[in-house]
Image (spheres, rainbow, N blue to C red):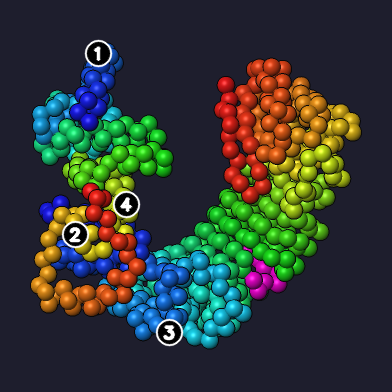
Amino acid sequence: MAEEVSSQMNSLSISETNPSSSATISLVSGDDIVFKVEPTIAKEMETVQSFIDETDGKITTIPLPNISSHDLPYVIEYCEKSIAGKITKEFEAEFVKKLNNEEVKELFLAANYLNIKKLLDFLSQVIADRIANKSVEYVRRYFGIENDFTPEEEAKLREELAWTFTGVDPDDEDEN
Amino acid sequence: MENLPSPLVVEILTRLKDSSDLARCRAVSTTLNQASNEVRSLTLHCSMSRYLKSRSPETKHLVTPFKTVLKNLVHRSRDFESVSIGVDRSLGGISFDDVEDESDDLHLTEFNFILDWLPCLSRSIKSLSVSDFWVQSCWRRSKALSLISSTCYGLVQLVIRNAWLAVDGLCLMPTLTNLTLEFVRLDDEDLNMINTCFPNLTQLNLIGVGGFKEPSINLSRLQICQWSVSNAPLSLTICAPSLVDFHLKCIKPKLIFLDAPSLSNFNLSLENTDELVLKNCGNIQCLQLEVECLSLGFILSMFRRYHCIVVERLNLDFVRRTQIVIGVEVDQVEFGFDILLNYFPNIRYLSLGSGAWHAMESSFRSGSFENATGMKTLKELIAHIVVLEIEFTLAFIFSILDKCTQLGDISMLIHSDVDPCVAGNLISTCRSKFPGVRWRWGIWKEGIKDTWVSDGI
């Protein structure tokens, strides 16, 4: 994965030598890696765009402390496809195939932070599909959340919701 | 993920395709339990396994009745905007004769059942979909439609499947713009109540709706319409000044009367008709025709008579496809390629089904063809072919290319039963004779999606 990131970074920095892209924007990941992108891509990221607008375009280096250099290339890849109008069902299926549950969640938070509506919609659906027809325990593990009901509350809820517990998929331990 | 903001949890929960998944998520944590209240859509479908469990003497008592589940869900949340309930499609395979089901536990258009929960949502609901269980609904006439019309103040979209619907007492629903009725017996033989009570429909789908005599669609705002109807109605009338996209599938009505000045995309499938009136239909640009071979000439002449001459894209195929068996000649009515293109002087794109191609190839064999006006404008051709004798097929293709000087894109789908050597020979001969044409090749077979083998060069 490290190689992949560095090769993507190379391809991004090569574009820097292109004279027409003198106005590139630098996105700085939380672990201080700089990604140079076309200004058009920033338009897909509302958070970045409003930052640029607020400073009248004078500042083109934008720190994104909440996003790691592992996740940022995925976000950029999605935005590039989106700008090219090439978001297809096939692309999305391929895109999500290479992501494990943890990565999907991190990208989901990144999309929320950057305010990328399309990516957020898409990943919400991916997560919904991944927790559909799963047990309560599976969903807890998936989100990494603790059961914070009192035993009485939980017993009452489980009784009320008994009709939903039949026919769920058996838990698969190595999903994550 | 513990600090996942609540709005994001709602985003995810909203996208769960089934409300039983959503309900189960309530038991995960207090955050999810609270977030579940924010979800505005309810989707509940009775699966085959649920149905079988509810019918088996051993498991019967363990299953909460479907209607109880729904009522509980609605009473808990109360402001759903979208409700979709129904039995799974797989239950559609069960017929009344097999089970003689006298119960009504899944009769979802039952008046009293809807009365139990729909009034709670009268102000919030915008979209309602009910797919009933035909075994229980087919012999019970339901007044659900009038109840829905008098209860929901802001309903925009309504879908009802597999039911028998009365229309007496139907109230005006000015907000309703989308209506789909599928496999419904509708007691509105001329569609008068639908036209009157739902005047602002922009999209109407009537799929396999029975009970018509001389139905007439009269809707001034209708833009998209899909209507597939049996051979029962004597005549079909459609007056829709805003209609843009129309799919009509019928068998043998005596009369079709269409008045649709905005219509640009017309998909017509019918075997035959005694009369086809196309009043003010001069804007049709994309025409998809599926007719009986014998009636093609008559139907095309009606298109000419009513000045439907701006057609740029034409898809033509025959209903009840004649089986073309390799090596066996089948008698078929001949219809010349030149005659076809004479009807459409502005045509740019033509797609021919196997029957249509065969009829035209046969016609070519019995004599060459003349210049036609449409030949000067045709740019793209797609054909589903069966190669019976390669020299005739090649001669036909080459004559088309000689006459249609603008034709630069040809896509040939060859039937999968054709000998690969013959197909290969056809492809290479075409390529070498007309290297300037962008050729695409593929394979077709009845009931299977076309497969493309090579893209154009």
How far apart marks 2 and 4 lie (CA) works out to: 18 Å
The three-letter amino acid code for the residue at tag 3 is: Pro
* Residue for badge 4: A125
The quarter holding residue B353 reads top right
Image mark 2: chain: A
Q: Element under label 3?
A: loop
B142 lies left or right of B310:
left
Q: CA gap, disc 3 to disc 1?
A: 75 Å
Q: What amino acid does circle 1 point to?
A: Thr
Q: Earlier in the sequence, mark 1 or mark 4?
A: 1
**Quadrant in which the C terminus of chain B appears:** top right
Give percent across and percent down for residue B404.
73, 25
Q: Find disc 3 in the rendering and name its residue.
A: B57
Q: Position of residue B375 (x, y in %)?
A: 74, 29
The chain that hosts pointer 3 is B
Q: Reply above or below: A20 against B353.
A: above
Residue that mark 1 sits on? A17
